[in-house]
Image: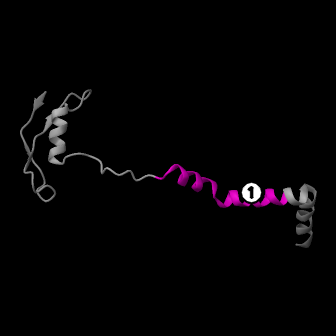
Amino acid sequence: MKRHRELPVDTAERSDQKYCERFEPDYTRGLNPQQVQMRQQQGLTNGEGEIKTKTVGQIIRGNLITPFNILNIILASMVFWWGPIKICCLWVWSFVIR
């Protein structure tokens, strides 16, 4: 593993660290545990810790309660309560009235 000279870190962000040692690990293996621990101690890790995603319930609710599905529920309930023939007659009357 090849080590390079230390590079300065932006002091506005990390006032406690002036230099950051740069590693060039093998791309198939990544950093070894000691290097990872060193990066964590320096605060040079990715991620914020909290996951900012929707729950499964929120996704299901968002996909089920849509205007199109509400319209389909209304039409299906009309067919269920009044029967398909009466609904057909309602459509005919609505065109005749216009």
Could you say which quadrant of the image residue 24 lies in? top left
Magenta segment, principal secondary structure? helix
Residue type at mark 1 is Asn
x, y (%) of residue 28?
27, 27
53 to the left or right of 43: right
Figure colour scheme: one colour
Quarter of the figure that contains the C terminus: bottom right
Q: Which residue is mark 1?
A: 72
Quarter of image, res 15: bottom left
Up-down: is 81 above or below 93?
Answer: above
* Residue at point 59%, 55% (across, down): 61
Q: Is residue 1 magenta?
A: no
Residue 16, x across and y down, in percent? 9, 54
- At x 88%, y 68%, the residue is 94
The magenta stretch is 54-79
Q: Does the magenta portion include 58?
A: yes
Q: Residue at x 15, y 33 (%)?
A: 34
Residue 18, position as x, y percentages in the image = 7, 51
**Mark 1 Cα within 10 Å, few/some/many (few <14, many 20+)?**
few
Q: Secondary structure at mark 1?
A: helix
Q: Is residue 53 above or below residue 30?
A: below
Quadrant where the N terminus lies? top left
Which one is nearer the viewer's eye here, 40 or 63? 40
- x and y percentages locating residue 48 in the rendered image: 30, 51
Residue pictured at 19% horizontal, 37% vertical: 36
Q: Nearer the viewer, residue 82 or 22?
A: 82
Question: Would residue 10 be found to the left or right of residue 56 on screen?
Answer: left
Q: Between residues 95 and 2, which one lies in front from this camera angle?
A: 2
